[in-house]
Image: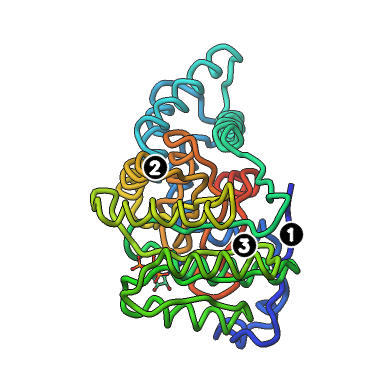
Amino acid sequence: MAFSFFNRRKDEPETPAAESSPEANEPRSLFERMRSAVTRTRESLSTTLGTVVALTREVDDASLDDLEFALLASDIGAPTTNEIIGRLRDRALRQGIASGAELRELLKAEILRILTSVAKPVYAPSNPPEVVMMVGVNGTGKTTTSGKLAALYRREGRSVLLCAADTFRAAAIEQLEVWSQRSGVDLIKTKQGGDPSAALFDAASAAKARATEILLVDTAGRLHTKADLMKELDKMVRTSDKVVPGSPHQTLLVIDATTGQNGLQQARLFTEAAKVTGIVLTKLDGTAKGGIVVAIAHELGLPVRYVGIGEKIEDIIEFDPVAFTESLLG
Ligand SMILES: Nc1nc2c(ncn2[C@@H]2O[C@H](COP(=O)(O)OP(=O)(O)OP(=O)(O)O)[C@@H](O)[C@H]2O)c(=O)[nH]1
């Protein structure tokens, strides 16, 4: 289990919370940060779950119906909820589960099973750079995630380069420039309205020449239905492969957790059009729809790699199925 600690760099801006509370300056464990990120989902789940799995309550059809309702309310979605409830019903009958506490443990095991079944290790290529592209619809947090990841990898001691290939949105390049300064990571860019593949060509060539370990590519927001923008994405992939054969090594689809089932639907259509290797789920901090993590794993078969838990530079954590499940139901 990767319960790692993250420290704020000295030159990063402090938050108002950090100024007012001495504990806020202490590095928090991944588990604590995950637990705080899913607070709203946990609270919403536990209102119903609390009564369903109260120690004394018997496991019957009515309690399973209540549980089904609680799971749907957290945006786990109908197909995933049905699968979980079906398996819980079987096991409750087979194993003679009589108490809510045991049912809670079974539920945790089911969620963990779904999340770990899609977890895959990421292997860096033998020759740098590893090219990682951020893709997704508008406003999900691609630029912010690129900046946060640049800082995270830097803190881990890896060399990083940023590429501003979102030449579409007016402020995207300037926004990434700010993240580049904050994280101390160089940025390769072109002008607004320029060809994103040209920026990527330059960035991949520079990363190769400098033997930079990771090249993070921020791309423009696009819908899978916009044929011209999807063609542009194809061109970027081909360009990347030409400069660094076999790349991009990772294509991370950035999804906004607050959009819940809508985000899942967008993701489904997006994965059909682009070769997505993993998910970054942003804005988990502001939503009671954290169950979407489980739906993504079950319905898309894709691992969630990172979750965004706020707007600050350190507000990103590597997704850990055990930490997530314990935070939600522990
Ligand atoms: N609370 C919270 N806000 C976030 C998180 N990630 C991103 N945001 C905010 O979401 C908004 C959109 O983020 P951007 O990074 O600009 O989104 P984008 O995907 O690059 O946008 P386009 O280029 O238009 O597609 C910004 O206000 C971010 O601060 C997160 O994990 N939590």
Q: Which residue is mark 3?
A: 33
Amino acid type at circle 1 is Ser
- Residue at numbered disc 2: 271
Question: Is the C terminus in the top left, top right, bottom left or bottom right quadrant?
Answer: top right
Horizontal and vertical percent for residue 257? Answer: 41, 55
Report the residue at 39% width, 54% height from top: 235
- What is the tally of numbered marks visible in this picture? 3
Can residue 157 be spotted in the picture? yes
Question: 61 or 72: which is nearer to us?
Answer: 72
Instruction: Of the two numbered discs 3 and 2 on the same chain, state the one appearing first in sequence.
Output: 3
Q: CA distance from mark 3 to mark 2?
A: 29 Å
Q: Nearer the viewer, mark 1 or mark 3?
A: 1
Q: In the image, is 136 to the left or to the right of 119?
A: left
First of labels 1, 3 by sequence position: 1
Residue 109 position, x and y percent, is: 61, 32
Identity, as a three-letter code, of the amino acid under mark 3: Arg
Q: Kindly identify which numbered label has been placed on residue 4.
A: 1
